[in-house]
């Protein structure tokens, strides 16, 4: 089983505060011979839906000396998990969870915004000190 990201508990607590229920920690993804683990699988009850909404969350810290290298790794993992979910006929959206400070700096670069738009990356932006979600970005 993979090691947890350093902000794993902060994101988990932020989601719980936001009304989400943790279903799996980590979430096992499987398709054919591929076996992977995303960080969280969560659900939120919606008044209009009996089943509620379920999403997969992959948490990334962006703490290495090279945020571009962190982005390369996060992007590859995000796309791989998104595609495995589709291939396995799991109709769950996947969100990349990143700190607000990283979103407000690195993710405001024009090149990064262009890639994010092209790849249709969905985000949960969180404040790790307050353990709160500050932004959902689709």
Image: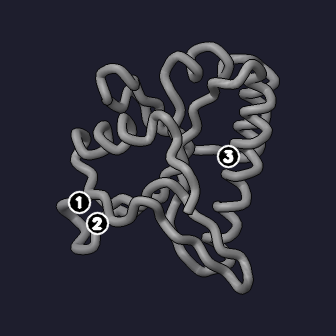
Q: Earlier in the sequence, mark 1 or mark 3?
A: 1
Q: Nearer the viewer, residue 125 or 115?
A: 125
Label 3, secondary structure: give it.
loop
Instruction: Using the rendered image of the protein, determine whether residue 13 is visible from the camera's viewpoint.
Output: yes
- Name the image quarter holding residue 72: top right
Q: Residues under labels 2 and 1: Cα distance?
A: 5 Å
Q: Residues under labels 3 and 2: Cα distance?
A: 23 Å
Drawn side of residue 117 relative to residue 60, left or right: right
Drawn side of residue 70 relative to residue 128, left or right: right
Whether 125 is drawn above or below 110: the answer is below
Label 1, secondary structure: give it.
strand
Q: Earlier in the sequence, mark 3 or mark 2?
A: 2
Q: Please report the residue visible at 25 percent of the width from the left and 45 percent of the height from the top.
A: 16
Q: Are marks 2 and 1 in contact (CB under 8 Å)?
A: yes
Look at the image and tell me in which quarter the N terminus lies: bottom right
Using a 10 Å C-alpha cutoff, classify the residue at mark 3 as few (fewer than 14 neighbours), some (14 to 19) or many (20 or more).
Answer: few
Residue at the spot of label 1: 46
Rendering coords of residue 13 (x, y %):
29, 40
Query: Looking at the rendered structure, which numbered label has been put on residue 52?
Result: 2
Rendering coords of residue 97 (x, y %):
51, 39
Rendering coords of residue 46 (x, y %):
23, 60
Drawn side of residue 24 relative to residue 35, left or right: left
Query: Looking at the rendered structure, which numbered label has been put on residue 120?
Result: 3
Q: Nearer the viewer, residue 54 or 76?
A: 76
Rendering coords of residue 71 (x, y %):
73, 34
Label 2, secondary structure: give it.
strand
Q: Earlier in the sequence, mark 2 or mark 1?
A: 1
Q: Please report the residue visible at 40 percent of the width from the left and 59 percent of the height from the top.
A: 25
């Amino acid at each position: 089983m993979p090691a947890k990201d350093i902000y794993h508990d902060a994101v988990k607590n932020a989601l719980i505060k936001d009304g989400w229920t943790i279903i799996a920690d980590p979430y096992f993804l499987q398709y054919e011979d591929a076996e992977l683990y995303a960080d969280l699988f969560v659900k939120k009850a919606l008044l209009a839906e009996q089943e509620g909404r379920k999403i997969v969350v992959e948490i990334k810290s962006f703490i290495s000396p090279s945020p571009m290298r962190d982005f390369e790794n996060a992007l590859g993992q995000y796309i791989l998990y998104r595609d495995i979910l589709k291939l396995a006929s799991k109709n769950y959206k996947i969100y990349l969870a990143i700190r607000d400070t990283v979103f407000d700096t690195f993710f405001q670069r024009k090149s990064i915004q262009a890639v994010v738009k092209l790849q249709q990356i969905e985000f949960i932006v969180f404040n790790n000190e307050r353990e709160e979600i500050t932004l959902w970005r689709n």
